[in-house]
Image: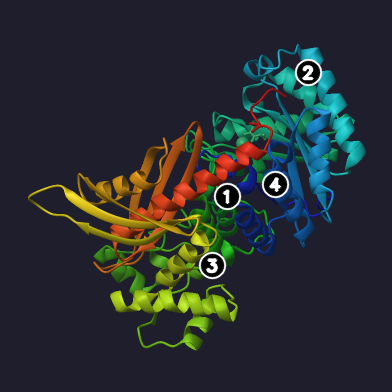
């Protein structure tokens, strides 16, 4: 990618599949990564950071396949500051029409102490590794990790070295979410003004949200001269997450009057990708999340509703359709046929082969028997469940629970494990506890339940419940999800979904020689 000729064009660099996926518990499968990458590519994201190829065989394979499939976006991989990482990264991204190597090293005093390098030794390492990357690929991004806590003189020195060695994008990460908007703008402004060669590269901003300022800091960096924002869908990322893509894209669109910058992102696709990332990562979107939260366009109070009916602009600064939120429609009921289901699913972005449609139709009928009115959201939840359970080794066959006053809850459960039915009975403190105990009796594991969360897909007491379960075992964190009109059934399916993912992770860890963290020494 060459430097855009339009000086007000901001490059959107999405790192959902790298920094987002790195968030404990947000691990995605290979196919899920390909699907998200395709959605990002289609919605006009300029650069997709598809993973960290040296981290595992799985990461490498995903980055390589995403690189082969990408139609428009530049495909980038992450590499630490050593030749082996960079070579592996290049092997994965070189398949792309437009490949990029992103190499980084921690430059702040705390990070310099990890590989125990002096300032001079680190400077030499930066020169050598960026030169090596540039010899492989003509699009090289370099990041001084923890830049916002790096001494100014040293930061300016190493940025200059990276530019001279051939970096085409210089990314300035606020790794720990420490900076504030005025500081973020000043830092970029000063680097551009004082570092020789700065006018020949693009400066990028990469903010974390620990103090809730990631979006403000990214936009301020753009005011200061940055022309690439690094961000993730739903702000997914470690700790408090990264800058949310949907927030910066909509802020630049809605407040174009005071921030006259453009992006190439089609904002009408934001809602669909937000839902999909929430589903595959197992990180639900908070209800009041800006732009993509369930309440972002809901006007419940009487005063608001009155104003809205008279003129939508009274309380709305953007239209729901600008972010791809269509009016929720009552779609179907138990008399709807297969053709109607096919066409509705197509409208929602799911194109199914005949055999797939037949399976989904059975589940749709079962849902319609229990729930009078089926909304778009119900169908999306049903499709997501269908996709999640596809390759699962453990499946829920049947569940009966007795609960109420006068004694412990009792659960009878049948699962199939690798196709073989197994049953158990268990009691517990309430229906969910009893049902989970029945699962534990059949699938022995030492995983600890980190999160159990329930939310309603639509309104009413017959609404489907979406349940998220997050488990931790020996440092591995996985999430599972499921939706059903019966909250206990959804809970057990979500638990089993998480256990399936845990088994996959165990197998993957066994086949990879080692699992590497990007925080390992440069
Ligand atoms: O937050 C960070 O510093 C990073 C780097 C690897 C760019 O994600
Ligand atoms: Zn980061």
- Front position among marks 2 and 3: 2
**Residue 201, image x, y percentages:** 82, 40
Image quadrant occupied by the C terminus: top right
Instruction: Give the mark, 2 or 1, whose residue is nearer the N terminus.
Output: 1
How far apart marks 4 and 2 lie (CA) works out to: 25 Å
The kind of secondary structure element at disc 3 is helix
Instruction: Give the mark, 4 or 2, whose residue is nearer the N terminus.
Output: 4
Q: Is mark 2 within 8 Å of ligand 1?
A: no
**In the rendered image of this protein, does residue 113 appear above or below residue 136?**
above
Instruction: Give the mark, 3 or 4, whose residue is nearer the N terminus.
Output: 4
- State the residue in front, 517 or 258: 517
- Front position among marks 1 and 3: 1
Instruction: Give the mark, 4 or 1, whose residue is nearer the N terminus.
Output: 1
- State the residue in front, 161 or 396: 396
**Residue 474, image x, y percentages:** 49, 31
Residue at x-position 66% and y-position 31%: 514
Judging by the rendered image, the residue that carries numbered circle 1 is: 28
Is residue 243 in view from this perspective? no
Specify the quarter for ligand 1: top right
């Amino acid at each position: 990618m060459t430097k855009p000729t339009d000086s007000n064009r901001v490059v959107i660099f999405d790192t959902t599949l790298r920094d987002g996926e790195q968030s404990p518990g947000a691990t995605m499968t290979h196919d899920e990564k390909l699907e998200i990458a395709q959605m990002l590519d289609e919605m006009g994201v300029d650069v997709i950071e598809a993973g960290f190829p040296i981290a595992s065989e799985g990461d490498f394979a995903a980055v390589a396949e995403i690189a082969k499939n990408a139609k428009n976006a530049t495909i980038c991989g992450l590499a630490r500051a050593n030749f082996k990482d960079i070579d592996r990264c290049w092997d994965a991204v070189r398949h792309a029409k437009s490949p990029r190597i992103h190499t980084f090293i921690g430059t702040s005093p705390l990070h310099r102490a990890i590989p125990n390098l002096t300032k001079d030794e680190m400077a030499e390492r930066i020169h050598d590794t960026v030169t090596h990357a540039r010899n492989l690929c003509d699009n090289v991004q370099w990041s001084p990790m923890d830049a916002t806590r790096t001494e100014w003189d040293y930061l300016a020195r190493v940025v200059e070295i990276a530019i001279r060695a051939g970096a085409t994008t210089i990314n300035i990460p606020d790794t720990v979410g420490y900076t504030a908007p005025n500081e973020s703008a000043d830092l970029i402004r000063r680097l551009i003004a004082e570092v020789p060669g700065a006018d020949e590269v693009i400066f990028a901003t990469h903010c974390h949200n620990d103090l809730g300022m990631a979006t403000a800091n990214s936009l301020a960096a753009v005011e200061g001269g940055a022309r690439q924002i690094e961000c993730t869908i739903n702000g997914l990322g470690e700790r408090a997450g990264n800058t949310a893509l949907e927030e910066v894209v909509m802020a630049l669109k809605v407040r174009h009057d005071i921030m006259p910058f453009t992006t190439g992102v089609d904002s009408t696709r934001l809602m669909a990708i937000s839902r999909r990332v929430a589903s595959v990562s197992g990180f639900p979107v908070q209800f009041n999340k800006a732009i993509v939260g369930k309440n972002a366009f809901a006007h419940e109070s009487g005063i608001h509703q009155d104003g809205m009916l008279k003129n939508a602009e009274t309380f709305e600064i953007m239209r729901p359709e600008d972010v791809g939120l269509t009016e929720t429609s009552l779609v179907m009921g138990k008399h709807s046929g297969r053709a109607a289901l096919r066409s509705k699913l197509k409208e929602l972005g799911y194109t199914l082969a005949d055999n797939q449609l037949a399976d989904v139709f059975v589940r749709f009928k079962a849902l319609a028997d229990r729930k009078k009115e089926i909304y778009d959201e119900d169908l999306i939840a049903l499709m997501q469940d269908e996709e999640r359970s596809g390759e699962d080794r453990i499946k829920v066959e049947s569940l009966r629970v007795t609960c109420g006053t006068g004694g412990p809850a009792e659960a009878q459960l049948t699962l199939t494990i690798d196709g073989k039915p197994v049953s158990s009975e268990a009691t517990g403190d309430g229906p969910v506890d009893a049902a989970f105990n029945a699962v534990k009796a059949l699938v022995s594991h030492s995983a600890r339940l980190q999160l159990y969360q329930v939310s309603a897909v639509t309104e009413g007491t017959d609404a489907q419940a979406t349940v998220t379960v997050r488990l931790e075992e020996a440092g591995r964190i996985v999430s599972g999800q499921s939706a059903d009109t019966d909250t206990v059934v959804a809970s057990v399916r979500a638990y089993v979904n998480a256990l399936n993912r845990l088994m996959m992770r165990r197998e993957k860890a066994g086949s990879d020689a080692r699992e590497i963290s990007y925080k390992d020494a440069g």
